[in-house]
Image: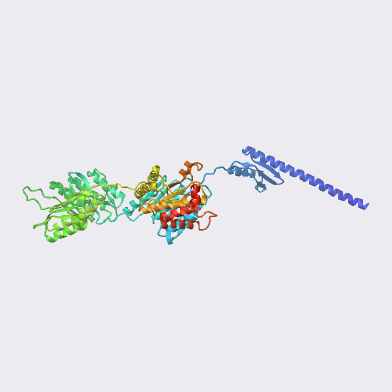
Amino acid sequence: MRISYILAVLSAFVLAAILSLIAARFSVMAVEDATEIGLRHAFDESGLEWAEVEADGLRVILAGTAPTEAERLRALSVAGGVVDATRIVNEMDVVPTADLLPPRFSVEILRNDAGISIIGLIPARTDRAALVEHLHDVAGPDGVTDLLQTADYDPPEGWEDALAYAVVALSKLPRSKISASAAGVTVNAMTDSAEERDALVRELNRAAPPGLRLALNISAPRPIITPFTLRFVIDEDGARFDACAADAEASRERIIAAAEKAGLKDRANCTVAMGMPAPSWVPAAEKAIAALAELGGGTVTLVDTDISLVAKQGTDPQLFDKVVGELESHLPEIFALKATLPAPEQSGDAPAPEFTATLSPEGLVQIRGRLNDDRLRKLVDGLARARFGSGHVHMAARVTQDLPADWPVRVLAGVEALSLLRNGYLSVQPDRLTLHGVTEHEEATDAVARLLADKLGENAVFDLRITFQPPPEPEDTTPDPEACIAELQEAQNDQKITFEPGSATMTAESVPTMNKIADILDKCGEIRLEIQGHTDSQGREEMNQQLSQARAQSVLNELRARRVLTSTYVAKGYGESRPIADNKTEEGREANRRIEFHLLRPELPEAPADGDAPGADEGADATEATHADTGADTGADTGADTGAAQKAPASDTQETE
């Protein structure tokens, strides 16, 4: 009885537990269904039909593939508005983005006295270690700061050429910033002089690979002019500058504007330089030029803070007094003005004494006229020989009396000024110095005016008529490297370079072709050239490569024997690896046996590929050095020993063996 009661109680408890579990399960299913229905309804209203929902108890699992990352985040936000965000398990994917655009690869290289810094993004395939090592060679002990980043994308077209050219340009510019990208290279640099700047621009333009967009911003420091001189003239030929200087572009424009208002027609060459004596120099120059224009002619010269105004002969004295008085009252206090009104010409006067010197375009100097004494005559002769050359001076001046006291200074200054011209005529008279001629330098007129004003004083009267003519281009200009390669190819069209069978010995028929090639390379100057040797496919591959190397070296030796400068040439054999015709026919094999000339472009040193045998490069260099030392005969013997099986008949092969 007692046992039956216990069993009944236990059965009741078990049944209650089962009923509770069933009720709980139904409750969980109801919650899950409600959650799924609510989320699906919310996703449908938000246009997120791609999203999938699965309720697992209190957990809510979101799945599906979102079209974008933004849509995936929006689905999470919508779900978080329906259920507690802590219950959400995110298993959504995003459609992978195809064909992502590569980043813009570019580098900026800065070089100064502290060394070289390089920063930018480069392709992972670019040999970063080789690039930095090459920069270390350029920087020397100053070192290289490497701030490069890499991205795993293919290098864009033009990237390698631009990067290699940037390193080449950097080696020539100790103070520079170079920006390189596939779109081109921009060079910003500073040089020590205008001449150095012009030479570098020519050199860098010549070194640029074809098709590379290049921007060269190379500047030179402003020159220092002392004394700071401006000389403006108005005469029967119009208005012009004999000398012009300014401290900045804005000052230059102000001075030229004042001159144009005074009648200047042609654009003036006004040098921007350092050395201006006072900030008020430009206003003083403007007022002096305007005063000369009001007088109607003459010259005005500013030498530092001294101003000399010489009116033209015949100027109305009342107008002269008025203009000079107004100019004196308006000039800054630090400037001193000396104004001169020439006396009217007197008829019947005896001819004035004169000294003349004529410089011909060939550099010959004829000196005539009057000098004070024999000591001055020897002094002028010595100065002329020092300036123009001992064998180019003909002295025909005579010694006379009654010359002005400043005659020696005027004569010596005139001869020195004449030496700044390519050819010209000098006349020295008591009241005037005249110098007419031609120069190859744009700044020569300024230099002559400063020299005369310094030697004779700012009040001196001198007439300058100097014409600028740029020097003619040399007739034998170095041709473009691409044109040189085309000429070398054309030289082999009639008779290509050939060799004895299985040998590196050049045939007699090839001698005229080699002479023609040597003449072409003499004209081409210093270009980087690879002389390539090629063979057909007969014989063993290794022996063909060795024979092609020997033949390329033989061509290099022949060029050296003809006194061609070959320091930038290299001989390289490619064996049978680069055929240009079918090796199954005799005509094809004949075409493949050839010498080619290839232009080497600037390129970065490459790291050895994985698996290369150690010392391979050293072996190649040693082989080339051996050929260079032993000459063509040794190359021929080597070719006979190593490469006779290349394409020779069976009898040749047996003899070689």
x and y percentages locating residue 517 in the rendered image: 37, 48
| Furthest residue toward right | 1
State the residue in front, 29 or 475: 475
Residue pictured at 40% horizontal, 59% vertical: 113
Is residue 252 visible to us here?
yes
Q: Is residue 177 visible?
A: no
Left-right relation of 590 to 467: right
How many badges with numbers are in the image? Answer: 0
Q: Position of residue 162 (x, y in %)?
A: 44, 49
Looking at the picture, how far across and down is residue 38, in whole percent? 68, 40
Residue pictured at 50% horizontal, 58% vertical:
615
Residue placed most toward the observer, 326 or 530: 530
Q: Nearer the viewer, residue 477 or 103?
A: 477
Q: Residue furthest left?
A: 348
Q: In the rendered view, how is the structure colored?
A: rainbow
280 sits to left or right of 511: left
In-image side of 235 versus 527 (left or right): left
Residue 369 screen position, x and y as percent = 12, 54
Looking at the picture, tell me which residue is in the foreground, 357 or 295: 357
Quadrant in the picture for residue 412: bottom left
